[in-house]
Image (tube, rainbow, N blue to C red):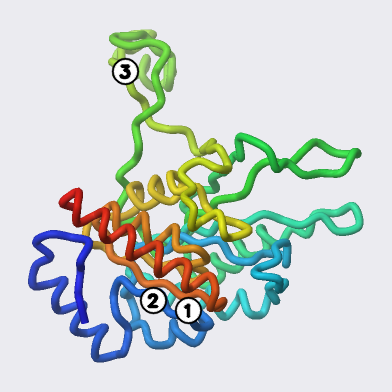
C-alpha cells in the first residue's frame, strides 16, 4: 500500500494510523465503490477529524440515469455511524437543501439537523452556501431559492477552528464603540471604549460561490458537484494538515481532491461505479500535480 503521497514528513503517528487502517482493510487516500453504511463499519471509533459531504437529499438529483433512493431511516443509520467514527472535537459539515412538494418545503434539512443533535452532536453553526449564478429554483408564487444549508456539527467541544479572515473592514485603526456600554461604563467610568480593527475581519457565515467556481472537467460529469473552493474553505477552517477528511458520498471526488491539495488525508465511499472511476482518475491527476508542486 502506498501511504500518504499527499504529505511530506508524515511522522510516526501517521504511519501507525495507516498501519491500523491496513489491518482493518481500510486504506487512507482511497475511494471505495460501495455503500457508505457497509464501508463505515470498517472504520474504527473516533477516527475521522472532519467530514464534508452532501447526501442525495429528497431524491432531488438523478445520478447516472438513476434516482438516488434515500430515506430518513437510512439517514439515521448514517448519522449514528458518523458520530461513532468522528473523533472527540471533530466536525461534520452536512450540506443539504429541501424539495418543494405540493407547495410545501419538506423541511428534511431541519429534521436531519435535529437528529444529529439527538445522536450527541453539537450544532456549532448553521451556515449558508449562496449560489451566485444560474440555477435558482422556485415557483412563481415565492422568491427564487439559490442557497443550501451548511450545518456544522461538532462532537463535543470543537478542536480546530482556523477561521478565515478575508472580509475587508470598512473602518481600519482605532475606533470608539458602544458595545457592552453599560458594563464598560460601570467598570471604568468611561462611556465608550476604543478598539483597534485590522484591515481584514472574520468572514460571515454566508458563503457565496459561483456554481461553476473551481470545477474541473471531471466534476462536470456529476449532476451535483461542489465548488472546489467551498470544500477547501471548510477543510482549512475545521482541520489541520495530516488530518483525515471523510466523505461518505464522494461523487466525483471534490472532497478527496481538496484534501490532498491541502495536505490532508481522505477516506471516501461512492456507490455508483461510474462516478467512483471518475473520482479515482481525478485523484490520480491531483496526486501527480501535487508531486510537481512539491506538496
The residue at which mark 3 appears reads as 199
The image quadrant that residue 285 belongs to is: bottom left
The residue at which mark 2 appears reads as 85
- Residue drawn at the location 40% of the way across and 74% of the way down: 31
- In the displayed structure, does residue 277 sit left or right of residue 171? right
The residue at which mark 1 appears reads as 81
- Residue drawn at the location 42% of the way across and 63% of the way down: 51
Q: Are marks 1 and 2 in contact (CB under 8 Å)?
A: yes
Q: Are marks 3 and 2 in contact (CB under 8 Å)?
A: no
- Residue drawn at the location 33% of the way across and 48% of the way down: 236
Q: Between disc 3 and disc 2, whose residue precedes?
A: 2
Q: Between disc 1 and disc 3, whose residue precedes?
A: 1
On screen, 278 above or below 20?
above
Q: Dot 1 lies on which element?
A: helix
The spot of residue 222 in percent (x, y) is 58, 60
The spot of residue 254 in percent (x, y) is 44, 58
Front one among 104 and 34: 34
Cα separation between marks 1 and 3: 42 Å
- In the displayed structure, does residue 199 sit left or right of residue 224? left
Amino acid at each position: 500500500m502506498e501511504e500518504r503521497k499527499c504529505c511530506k514528513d508524515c511522522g510516526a503517528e501517521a504511519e501507525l494510523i495507516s498501519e491500523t487502517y491496513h489491518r482493518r482493510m481500510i486504506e487512507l487516500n482511497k475511494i471505495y465503490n460501495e455503500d457508505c453504511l457497509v464501508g463505515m463499519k470498517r472504520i474504527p471509533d473516533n477516527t475521522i477529524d472532519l467530514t464534508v459531504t452532501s447526501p442525495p437529499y429528497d431524491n432531488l438529483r438523478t445520478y447516472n440515469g438513476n434516482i438516488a433512493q434515500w430515506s430518513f431511516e437510512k439517514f439515521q443509520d448514517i448519522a449514528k455511524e458518523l458520530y461513532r467514527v468522528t473523533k472527540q472535537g471533530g466536525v461534520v459539515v452536512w450540506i443539504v437543501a429541501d424539495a418543494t412538494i405540493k407547495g410545501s418545503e419538506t423541511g428534511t434539512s431541519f429534521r436531519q439537523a435535529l437528529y444529529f443533535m439527538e445522536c450527541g452532536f453539537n450544532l456549532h453553526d448553521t451556515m449558508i452556501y449562496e449560489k451566485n449564478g444560474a440555477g435558482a429554483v422556485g415557483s412563481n408564487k415565492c422568491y427564487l431559492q439559490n442557497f443550501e444549508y451548511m450545518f456544522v456539527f461538532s462532537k463535543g467541544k470543537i478542536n480546530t477552528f482556523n477561521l478565515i479572515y478575508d472580509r475587508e473592514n470598512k473602518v481600519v485603526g482605532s475606533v470608539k464603540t458602544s458595545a457592552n456600554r453599560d458594563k464598560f461604563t460601570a467598570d471604568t467610568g468611561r462611556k465608550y471604549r476604543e478598539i483597534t480593527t485590522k484591515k481584514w475581519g472574520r468572514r460571515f457565515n454566508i458563503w457565496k460561490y459561483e456554481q461553476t467556481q473551481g470545477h474541473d472537467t471531471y466534476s462536470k460529469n456529476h449532476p451535483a458537484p461542489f465548488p472546489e473552493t467551498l470544500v477547501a474553505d471548510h477543510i482549512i477552517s475545521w482541520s489541520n494538515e495530516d488530518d483525515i477528511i471523510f466523505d461518505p458520498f464522494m461523487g466525483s471526488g471534490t472532497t478527496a481532491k481538496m484534501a490532498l491539495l491541502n495536505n490532508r488525508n481522505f477516506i471516501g465511499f461512492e456507490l455508483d461505479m461510474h462516478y467512483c472511476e471518475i473520482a479515482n482518475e481525478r485523484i490520480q491527476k491531483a496526486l501527480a500535480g501535487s508531486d510537481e508542486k512539491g506538496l
